[in-house]
Each structure stands twice: as C-alpha cells, then as structure tokens.
Image (spheres, helix red, strand yellow):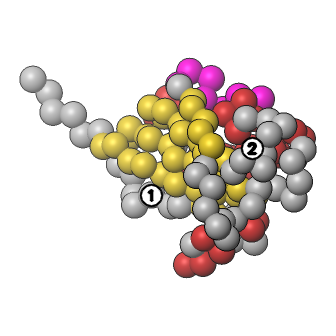
Amino acid sequence: MEACNRRVWAIRGATTVSSDDPALIDEAVGELLSLIYKENNFSEEDVVFTLFSQTSDLRSRNAAAAARRNGFSTHSPLFCVQEAEIDGMLERAIRVMIEVEKDNMDSPKMIYLRGASGLRPDLKRN
C-alpha cells in the first residue's frame, strides 16, 4: 500500500463591504477568494469544502452564491451561515474557512482584507 503524503489544511480569511449590495458582496468575495487561492498556491481540485459566515446586516446576497458567481468551488460543497449577533461586532463582514487537501504546502496564509484587517492586525493587507 502506497503512503499518502497529502495533508488537510484549514485556511481562514475575512473581508467587509461598505453596504449591503449584491455587486459589492460579489466583488469582495471574489477578491478574497482569489487572494487566498493565489497566496496559498492551491486550485479547485485541492478544495474539500468552503464554509462562509456573514453578519446579519448582509441580506442581499449569500456569500456562497457570490463565490459561485465568481467561478469558485464549482465542484466542491459550499455552505454559508449567519454570524452570531454580538455587541460591538464588526459590521457587514464576510468570513471564510476553506478546507484544502494538498501535499507540499507551506504553512497556510490567512487573508484579512478591508475592514476585517482589524480582526487580525498581524496579517493586515491594504
């Protein structure tokens, strides 16, 4: 029996939008996923599933639907849930966790964009 060298990785990220607008959600999700895929050097074939959460103030578009509209996860499951409402929480936020199965991957790079960069200041991007 041949040994399998593939490992499972959970890659996280988040972004925000300025208002609850389907086009803005599509753009933000596309930007976030594009950067996560690029920075972590994986492809659709490596994705096991993608889990999104979004705050309750985003009602015009489901983040999973935005991912599909951008051509992501065409052959892997997507799921989107609503964030728990907590006092002082970040508004109009979309979070993602992508489970990837891949060999020869360096330590995963988490991507936090726009207003979500404050969630992980150590990973801040412009």
Q: Which residues are magenta?
A: 67-76
Q: Is residue 32 visible?
A: no
Residue 66 highlighted magenta (yes or no):
no
Question: Is tag 2's residue or tag 1's residue first in the polypeptide sequence?
Answer: 2
Q: Residue at x 34, y 43 (%)?
A: 8
Residue 122 drawn at (x, y percent):
55, 78
Residue 72 highlighted magenta (yes or no):
yes
The amino acid beneath tag 2 is Gly
Q: Which residue is mark 1?
A: 108
Residue 84 drawn at (x, y percent):
58, 52
Q: Is residue 11 left or right of residue 79?
A: left
Overall secondary structure of the magenta section: loop
Residue 28 drawn at (x, y percent):
78, 50
Is residue 12 placed above or below 121 in the rendered structure? above
Count the labels in the image: 2
Quadrant location, the N terminus = top left
Q: Is residue 27 left or right of residue 88?
A: right
Q: Residue at x 63, y 55 (%)?
A: 85
- Could you tell me which secondary element the residue under label 2 belongs to? helix
Q: Residue at x 60, y 78 (%)?
A: 121
Quadrant location, the C terminus = bottom right
- Could you tell me which secondary element the residue under label 1 belongs to? loop
- Residue 78: image quadrant is top right
Q: Which mark is residue 30?
A: 2
Q: Who is closer to the viewer here, 81 or 86?
A: 86
Q: Is residue 58 left or right of residue 102?
A: right
Circle 2 residues within 10 Å: few <14, some 14–19, many ≥20? many
What separation in Å lies between label 2 and label 1 (alpha carbons)? 19 Å
The amino acid beneath tag 1 is Pro
